């Protein structure tokens, strides 16, 4: 058994990615532009400066900071009443609680959105550590957010499981030396993820099964 588990949130614990995608339409409309699926995909799993860099690649003549802030505000409003939990989340959390494994959330979302989803989903009590990538100098795909979470828990990355759905999150987990498992949501694993992630699982229920069989950590 691993010494701790660090969860990403959007697309991994909660089905928020379709909401983020929908939030791009009014965000871009506010500056006179139409929805761009490639831009939305490029920004998935990012925050802060990495999201701003992605926005600037697609829209070099706009204020990337303003676009990011509008997107976050719009998505927060859309998600205020809650979003569905991903299959297997409750069962995995119950199993980990039974094993007395410390849990953290390390998400690119704002602290307010993290707390909102955990509270609305009835799972806030499972997590003693919450880390937001907003304002972080080196967001995903850099490993800083996961390293910060591991430091707060007091565990070694090599003995810590990181659960991610995004390609940038997988890169961050691998770069930090974590046991990194991808549970894909809207984006399929690429060659890097298949070659470098510890496992690629179809669901959080599969993660629970692997832990029960002692096949992770």
Image (tube, grey):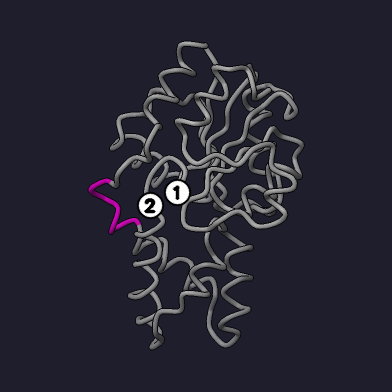
Q: Compared with residue 189, is residue 2 higher up or lower down, i.e. above or below?
A: above
| Residue 73 horizontal/vertical position (percent) | 37, 62
Residue 205 sits inside the magenta stretch: no
Instruction: Say left or right for 2 vs 118.
Output: right
**Residue at left offset 65%, top offset 39%:** 146
| Residue 47 horizontal/vertical position (percent) | 56, 58
What residue range appears in magenta? 76-82
Q: In the rendered view of the protein, which quadrant contains the N terminus?
A: top right
Of label 2 and label 1, which has the lower sequence position? 1
**Residue at left offset 39%, top offset 84%:** 34
Q: Compared with residue 83, is residue 124 higher up or lower down, i.e. above or below?
A: above
Q: Which mark is residue 89?
A: none
Q: How many C-alpha atoms fall within 10 Å of the one at disc 1: few (<14), some, or many (≥20)?
A: many
Front one among 48 and 97: 97
**Residue at left offset 41%, top offset 19%:** 94
Quadrant of the rendered structure where residue 70 is? bottom left
| Residue 170 horizontal/vertical position (percent) | 65, 47
Circles 2 and 1, Cβ within 8 Å, touching? The answer is: yes
Front one among 69 and 60: 60
Label 2 SS: loop
Give the alpha-carbon distance from disc 2 to disc 1, as whole Å: 6 Å
Q: Compared with residue 189, is residue 155 higher up or lower down, i.e. above or below?
A: above
Q: In the rendered view of the protein, which quadrant contains the C terminus?
A: top right
Q: Compared with residue 76, is residue 131 higher up or lower down, i.e. above or below?
A: above
Front one among 184 and 106: 184
Quadrant of the rendered structure where residue 153 is? top right
Q: Which mark is residue 11?
A: 1
Label 1 SS: loop
Q: How many marks?
A: 2
**Residue at left offset 27%, top offset 46%:** 82
| Residue 7 horizontal/vertical position (percent) | 53, 36
Q: Which mark is residue 16?
A: 2
């Amino acid at each position: 058994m691993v010494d701790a588990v660090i969860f990403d949130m959007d697309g991994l614990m909660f089905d928020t990615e379709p909401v983020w995608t929908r939030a791009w339409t009014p965000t871009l409309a506010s500056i006179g532009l139409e929805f761009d699926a490639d831009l939305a995909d490029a920004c998935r799993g990012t925050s802060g400066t990495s999201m701003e860099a992605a926005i600037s690649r697609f829209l070099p003549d706009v204020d990337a900071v303003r676009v990011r802030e509008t997107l976050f505000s719009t998505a927060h409003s859309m998600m205020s009443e809650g979003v569905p939990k991903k299959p297997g989340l409750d069962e995995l959390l119950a199993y980990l609680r039974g094993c007395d494994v410390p849990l953290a959330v390390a998400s690119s979302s704002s602290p307010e959105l993290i707390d909102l989803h955990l509270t609305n989903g009835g799972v806030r009590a499972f997590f003693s550590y919450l880390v937001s990538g907003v304002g972080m100098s080196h967001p995903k795909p850099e490993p800083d957010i996961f390293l910060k979470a591991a430091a707060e828990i007091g565990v070694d990355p090599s003995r810590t499981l990181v659960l991610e759905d995004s390609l940038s999150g997988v890169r961050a987990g691998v770069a930090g030396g974590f046991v990194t498992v991808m549970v894909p949501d809207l984006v399929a694993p690429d060659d890097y993820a298949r070659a470098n992630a510890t496992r690629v699982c179809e669901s959080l229920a599969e993660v629970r099964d692997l832990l029960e069989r002692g096949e992770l950590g």
